[in-house]
Image (cartoon, helix red, strand yellow):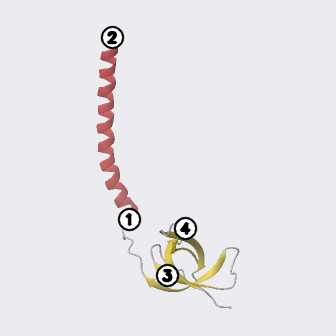
Amino acid sequence: MTQRILEGFVVSDKMDKTVVVNVSRRKQHPRYKKVITRHSKYQAHDEVNNCAIGDLVRIQECRPISKSKRWRVIEIVRRGDIAEISPADIGREIEEGKQDEVEEVGAALEEANEAADVVEEVES
């Protein structure tokens, strides 16, 4: 039996010795002739935990390794370009910027509520 070989991007590497690979294929619709993209996710065996999120890998069909693993990573074609920044650094910058916006929106809402109270008093 011929073993299929597919190429896709690693979308998860949280499991031990397992990666989830997203394989995209383009196909023409039979009636409308528009080219559409279909995606499939495969769990692949990564013996040395070498793959990371964003890597382009080549996977090969193999014997069943577990309930859902029937593929094996045979090579990493290209490393992903994920930034090496700690989440704390990113989070602090975002929180500080968002905090100012939240305070501005809160002040605007208070002013709007006060104006609405004044309008209600005038009408009654």
What whole-number distance in Å separates the C-alpha atoms at marks 4 and 1?
A: 48 Å
Of mark 2 and mark 3, the one earlier in the sequence is 3
Q: Amino acid at mark 3?
A: Val
CB-based contact (under 8 Å), mark 2 and mark 1: no
The amino acid sitting under disc 2 is Glu
Classify the position of the N terminus by image quarter: bottom right
Q: How many C-alpha atoms fall within 10 Å of the one at disc 4: few (<14), some, or many (≥20)?
A: few
Q: Tell me the residue that label 4 is attached to.
A: 31
Q: Which residue is mark 3?
A: 57
Of the image marks 4 and 2, the number of the one nearer the N terminus: 4
| Mark 2 or mark 1: whose residue is earlier in sequence | 1
Residue of label 1: 86
Residue shown at the point (67%, 73%) measured from the top left: 68
Q: Which residue has dot 2 on it?
A: 123
Callout 1: helix, strand or loop? loop
- At x 32% / y 28%, what residue is drawn? 110
Task: Indicate the amino acid at tag 4.
Answer: Arg
> What is the C-alpha distance between the residues marked 2 and 1?
56 Å
Residue nearest the viewer, comparing 87 with 51: 51
Q: Quadrant of residue 61?
A: bottom right
Mark 2 against mark 1, which lies toward the viewer?
Answer: 2
Question: Horizontally, is 81 left or right of 27 in the view?
Answer: left
Of tags 4 and 3, the one toward the viewer is 4
Label 2 and label 3: CA atoms lie apart by 70 Å
Amino acid of disc 1: Ser
Distance from the alpha carbon under mark 4 to that under mark 3: 33 Å
